[in-house]
Image (cartoon, helix red, strand yellow):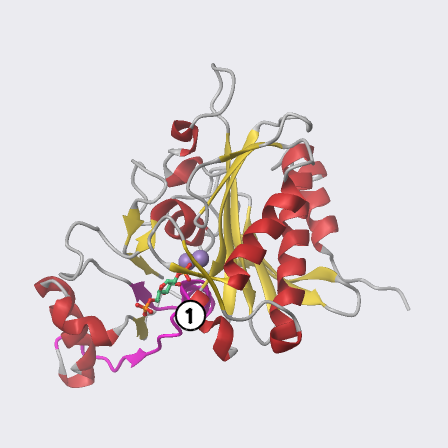
């Protein structure tokens, strides 16, 4: 039987050849990222049968405990991407400094950033987790790669996306002209296009926030959530529902799919931090995917992405 489904490979070839949206180097780079996500998906699925559960006994640069799968996912992404010749360097939530492509491999023009495993606290309890990634062009005009080369605003991303490891493995990708969703066909071992030109519902009925932090929030955030909780009788005149998976990648995927708002706002526990989530590894790429129909060939800027001052700058809110 002829298979008329569109694979990720074919989708990317068409983005390059028919629509002229991406150069071949970027296409190949995205294929490699997707291949790494596939490997991570298989490791996640093995669960207790593999050697990927539990704590690694180490801390990352943010002072968070690392899980074994955080490290495995990080290594998988590095190993898959370092030799292809399309990248100059990578930066990850799980690494202290940038990872420059070793001299034994050719250096390319792109920079790759990732949160290898988002939602680490859910790994051991079999709840959806994911990988988030963002691609930038290395600035021209100087040899080598420096930390500062990564510090570009969200609207300079040339591609971004994420992969959710849930009941299905779903890859969502944008090269600047709307988001496309792919579902992993495990028998075939390939990602198949399942939704294109994804648009987020403009009508918001759901909010996602960790309510246990309510007493630490700033007054405007508390007032907004109070208004949502007041439902049809309150000032917003509408009943709202709440969901909190505690994997931003899955919470935002739900919002991208059916509308809503996701927030991890600043709070009084760590007043020196603008929020818990990382701008470059989490908010910029996640914020780029819902904006279909951008006239720009680049991933459109998320509402929170200003100019970045550090790869671990934080951002706090994303909405439909
Ligand atoms: P990570 O696992 O990459 O460190 O990110 C976890 C983040 C985010 O995915 C999630 O929304 C949030 O932490 C959950 O925080 P709480 O446990 O405080 O709810
Ligand atoms: Mn994360
Ligand atoms: Mn992470």
What segment carries the magenta color?
A: 235-263
Quarter of the picture containing the N terminus is bottom right
Please tell me whether mark 1 sits on a helix, a strand or a loop: helix
Residue at 47% from the left image edge and 36% from the top image edge:
98
Question: Is residue 85 in the magenta section?
Answer: no
Q: Residues within 10 Å of mark 1 (few under 14, many from 20)?
A: some
Closest to the observer, 65 or 182: 65
Q: Is residue 193 positioned above or below 12 on the image?
A: below
Tell me if residue 236 can be seen. no
Q: Residue furthest right?
A: 1
Which residue position is annotated with label 1?
Answer: 121
Q: Is residue 310 positioned above or below 165 on the image?
A: above
Within the displayed image, which quadrant is ligand 1 positioned in? bottom left
> Hey, which quadrant is residue 194 in on the image?
bottom right
Total number of numbered labels? 1
Closest to the observer, 4 or 63: 63
Report x, y in % for residue 93. 43, 49
Question: Is residue 251 in the magenta section?
Answer: yes
Quarter of the picture containing the C terminus is bottom left
Instruction: Confirm or reject: label 1 Cβ below 8 Å from ligand 1.
Output: yes
Q: Residue furthest left?
A: 219
Closest to the observer, 258 or 264: 264
Q: Residue furthest bottom?
A: 233
Report x, y in % for residue 255. 41, 67
Tell me if residue 252 can be seen. yes
């Amino acid at each position: 039987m002829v298979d008329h489904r569109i694979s990720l490979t074919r989708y990317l070839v068409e983005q390059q050849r028919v629509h002229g949206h991406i150069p071949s180097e970027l296409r190949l780079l995205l294929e490699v990222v997707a291949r790494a996500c596939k490997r991570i998906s298989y490791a996640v699925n093995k669960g207790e049968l593999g050697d990927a559960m539990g704590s690694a006994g180490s801390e990352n640069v943010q002072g968070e405990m690392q899980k074994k799968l955080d490290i495995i996912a990080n290594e998988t992404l590095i190993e898959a991407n370092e030799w292809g010749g399309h990248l100059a360097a990578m930066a990850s939530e799980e690494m202290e400094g940038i990872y420059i492509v070793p001299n034994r491999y050719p250096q390319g023009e792109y920079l790759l950033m990732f949160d290898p495993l988002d939602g680490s606290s859910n790994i051991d309890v079999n709840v959806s987790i994911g990988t988030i990634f963002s691609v930038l062009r290395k600035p021209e005009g100087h040899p080598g790669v420096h930390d500062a080369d990564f510090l570009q605003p969200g609207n300079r991303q040339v591609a971004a996306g994420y992969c959710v490891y849930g009941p299905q493995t779903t890859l969502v990708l944008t090269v600047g002209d709307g988001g496309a969703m792919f579902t992993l066909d495990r028998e075939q071992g390939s990602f198949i296009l399942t939704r294109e030109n994804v648009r987020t519902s403009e009508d918001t009925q759901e909010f996602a926030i960790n309510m246990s932090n309510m007493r630490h929030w700033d007054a405007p955030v508390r007032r907004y959530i109070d208004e949502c909780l007041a439902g049809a009788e309150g000032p917003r005149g509408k009943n709202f529902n709440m969901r909190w998976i505690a994997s931003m990648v899955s919470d935002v995927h739900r919002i991208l799919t059916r509308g809503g708002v996701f927030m991890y706002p600043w709070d009084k526990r760590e007043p020196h931090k603008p929020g818990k989530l990382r701008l470059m590894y989490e908010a910029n790429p996640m914020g780029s995917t819902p904006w279909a129909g951008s006239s720009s060939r680049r991933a459109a800027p998320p509402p929170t992405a200003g100019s970045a001052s550090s790869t671990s700058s934080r951002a706090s809110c994303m909405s439909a």
